[in-house]
Image (spheres, rainbow, N blue to C red):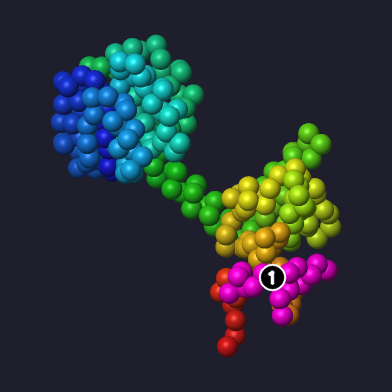
Amino acid sequence: MKCIIVDDEATARAVVAKFCEDSPEISVEEDFSNAIDAIKFLNKQEVDVVFLDIHMPGFTGFDFVETLKKPPKIVLITSDKDLALQAYEYEAIVDYLVKPLTKERFIKCVTKVKTAIQNQAIIESASSANNSLGLGELYINIDHRLIKLKFNEILVIQALGDYINIKTENTEYKVHNTLKKIKEKLPTDIFLQIHRSYIINFTKIIDIEDNSVLIDKNVIPISRSNKPKLMQHLNLLK
């Protein structure tokens, strides 16, 4: 596991670095005396865990976590025992070490971080598999109600000005949103934009003729620029 250490106290950084050195499962990529430099580093490189002091001049550990769009696992290090409850409000924070650190407690922390990373990998793998099978889901807002749609139920999504029309086998939903935004939510292994106004579930294609596809009873145009991409996604017998 790759890590960085962020603490304004040089002695504290040295202690964590020594514990990491003694642990074969962790390698220290860098250490930082201020949060800003650490954030700049994380914007360019990925690590698995950050050992982070809560109290730093002008920037708390909580500020640090909130600044990162996709934070790695965070282990907070502090002399203050009273912030543990607040710390666990953050999903990225997996442990809370109180100074002075001990080797025994640090080893337990490493085990906890490793487990958290493994669990996240399992969840992400399961989610990816579900999406590939169309078993994932999407919630849409209709008249202040959240309606769940399974990916494999969606046939076609059409842009209609400031709205999108989502068609399933039995129903259509008109949602105030854009094709671009919903495209970001859809698994790319079953959905494809084939026209500036249409995204299709290409596993539901019945027929392709010239520059259109048939899905259920819907004839959908294919733009010339998107047709090669569609053909690449099809299991063609040549």
Look at 40% across and 45% down and name the residue there: 118
Q: Is residue 85 left or right of residue 7?
A: right
Q: Is residue 225 visible?
A: yes
Name the foreground residue: 168 vs 80.
168
Q: Is residue 202 magenta?
A: no
Q: Mark 1 = which residue?
A: 222
Q: Position of residue 169 (x, y in %)?
A: 80, 60
Magenta region: 210-228
Q: Amino acid at mark 1?
A: Ile
User: Taking 113 as reference, is 215 left or right?
Assistant: right
140 or 20, which is in the foreground? 140
Quadrant in which the N terminus is drawn: top left
Q: Quadrant of residue 219?
A: bottom right
Image-quadrant location for residue 75? top left
**Residue displayed at 30% across by 17% down:** 56
How many other residues sit within 10 Å of disc 1, few (<14), some (14-19) or many (≥20)? many
Secondary structure of the residue carrying tag 1 is loop
Q: Is residue 227 magenta?
A: yes
Above or below for 232 versus 60? below
Q: Horizontal and vertical percent for residue 188?
A: 57, 59
- Can residue 115 be seen in this snapshot? no
